[in-house]
Amino acid sequence: QVRIIKVCFLSNSSNLGKNFKLVRCEDGWTIKNVISTVLSSGCVGPGITHSLCYGLLLKHLKSSEMYWLHPDLTVSELTQRYVQQHLEAEW
């Protein structure tokens, strides 16, 4: 199944108005793949050399629950563990 994940970030680029990237991915993708896609797009900034130093923090907007996501976690596992806990898609 194809999913769209919105990844928000702080950027060192000149485009201050856009601080997120919509990543189109499949259930088998890992968090590492999602991070790699965001970094290789250049939207975080040019010349990222230490991509393994980046991580994803999942935050539920209404309850303020937060979880650091393991790089080997798949998108399917992410959906099962966290997204289905809340009826509203406010992650």
Image: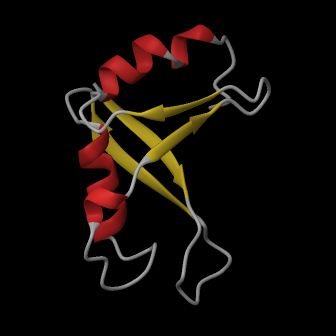
Residue drawn at point x = 31 percent, y = 77 percent: 48
Is residue 42 shown left or right of residue 65?
A: left
Above or below: residue 47 compared with residue 26 = below
Residue drawn at point x = 55 percent, y = 75 percent: 11
**Front residue of this view, candidates 48 and 7:** 48
Q: Residue furthest right?
A: 62
Quarter of the figure that contains the N terminus: top left
Residue drawn at point x = 58 percent, y = 90 percent: 14
* Residue 82 in the image, given as x and y percentages of width and height: 51, 17
Q: Residue furthest left?
A: 28
Is residue 17 shown left or right of residue 82?
A: right
Identify the image quadrant of residue 54.
bottom left
Above or below: residue 60 compared with residue 15 = above
Residue drawn at point x = 24 percent, y = 47 percent: 33
Is residue 54 shown left or right of residue 63?
A: left
How many numbered badges does the structure rendering display? 0
Above or below: residue 42 compared with residue 67 = below
* Residue 3 in the image, given as x and y percentages of width and height: 38, 34
* Residue 51 in the image, given as x and y percentages of width and height: 28, 64
